[in-house]
Amino acid sequence: MKKIVLGVLLVSLFTLSACSSKKETAKSSAGSQASSQTASSAVKTDLEKIDLPQLDSGVAKTEDEVELVTSKGNITMKLFPKQAPKAVENFVKHAKDGYYNGVTFHRVIKEFMIQSGDPKGDGTGGESIWGKPFKNEISNQLYNIRGAVSMANSGGDNSNGSQFFIVQNDQDQSDGLLIDDYPQKIIDAYKKGGYPQLDGKYTVFGQVTSGMDVVDEIANVKVDSNDKPEEAISIEKINILQEAQN
C-alpha cells in the first residue's frame, strides 16, 4: 500500500519562483507589451475581488466549526464546505463517527506541518467515508498559509482518504510569490508563514482559528528518522461546534 505523504519532502523551506499551478496570465503570441500589461491588470483585479474565508477570524453560517481535543491541548478549526464539499463532508462524518478518536499525529516536521488521520499510525492507512479515494478540490479562495488544514494524499489527484495535515511553518514565505497568481492579502498572509509550494496540489478545506500554540508544541516534539514523534500524540476526540447551513 502506498504511504500517504506530502509530495514536498524537503525539510529546508524554499521560496516559490513561479506559480503556474494557480492561474496563468493571459498571453498572446503576437500581442504587444501594452496588451500583456492590460491582461495582467485584469487578472490582478479579479484576484483582489476573490473572497478569502481563511483570513476572516469569524465563522460564517455556511462554515463548519470543529474542535480537536488532543493530548497536547485543543485546536479549533473552521471548515469550508462551499469550496471543498467532499473533503469537509468526509472529515465531519469521520469526526461524528469517532473515526479519528485515538488516532495519532504520525508525521511531524517542524517548520512544515503536522499530519494525522491514519488509524494505522504509520502513514499507510485510512480511507474515505465512501470506501474509496476522492479527487482534490482546488480553490483559488484557499491557500496553504500558516494554520491551513489540508488533505494529505499519495501524490495523485484522486488519492484522498482520511489523512490530513495542519500547516505549521511560521517563517516568511512571501518572497517570490507573483501578484498575478496570488491575491495581495494572501501574499501578506504568507509573510506570517505557510507553505505555498503545496498550493494546487493538496485540498485546503479548513483553517485553525485558535490553538496554533498547540500546533507549534506538537511540531516541536522529538521525532525519529521517519518524522514520527517519539511520544505518542493523539486526537482524543473531535467536537462538532457548528454545522454549516446552506
Image (spheres, rainbow, N blue to C red):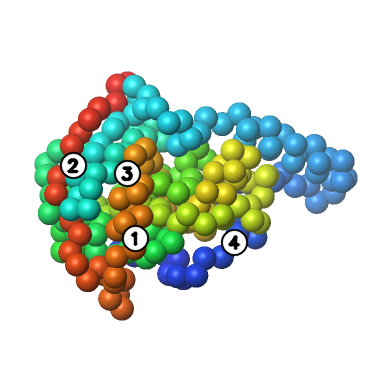
Q: Are marks 3 and 1 in contact (CB under 8 Å)?
A: no
Q: Amino acid at mark 1?
A: Ala
Q: CA distance from mark 1 to mark 4?
A: 21 Å
* Residue pointed to by mark 3: 211
**Mark in the foreground, 2 or 1:** 1
Tag 2: amino acid: Ile
Q: Quadrant of residue 122?
A: bottom left
Report if the CB atoms under discs 2 and 3 are less than 8 Å apart.
no
Which secondary structure, mark 2? strand
Q: Secondary structure at mark 1?
A: helix
Q: How far across and how far down the image is residue 104, in percent?
A: 19, 59
Q: Is residue 83 left or right of residue 94?
A: right
Quickly name the residue at label 2: 238
First-in-chain label (2 vs 1): 1
Give the Cα distance between marks 4 and 2.
34 Å
Pointer 4 and pointer 3: residues touching (CB < 8 Å)?
no
Instruction: Looking at the picture, tell me which residue is in the foreground, 161 or 118.
Output: 118
Q: Left or right: where does residue 123 sit relative to residue 152?
A: left
4 and 2 marks in contact (CB < 8 Å): no
Q: Where the C terminus falls, by quadrant? A: top left
- Please name whichever residue, 161 or 228, is drawn nearer the observer in this view of the structure: 228
For the residues carrying marks 2 and 3, which lies nearer the camera in this image? 3
Q: Which residue is mark 4?
A: 15
**Residue 78 appears left or right of 125:** right
Whether label 1 touches label 4, CB < 8 Å: no
- Residue 109, can we see it? yes
Q: Is label 4 or label 3 in front?
A: 3
Q: Amino acid at mark 4?
A: Thr
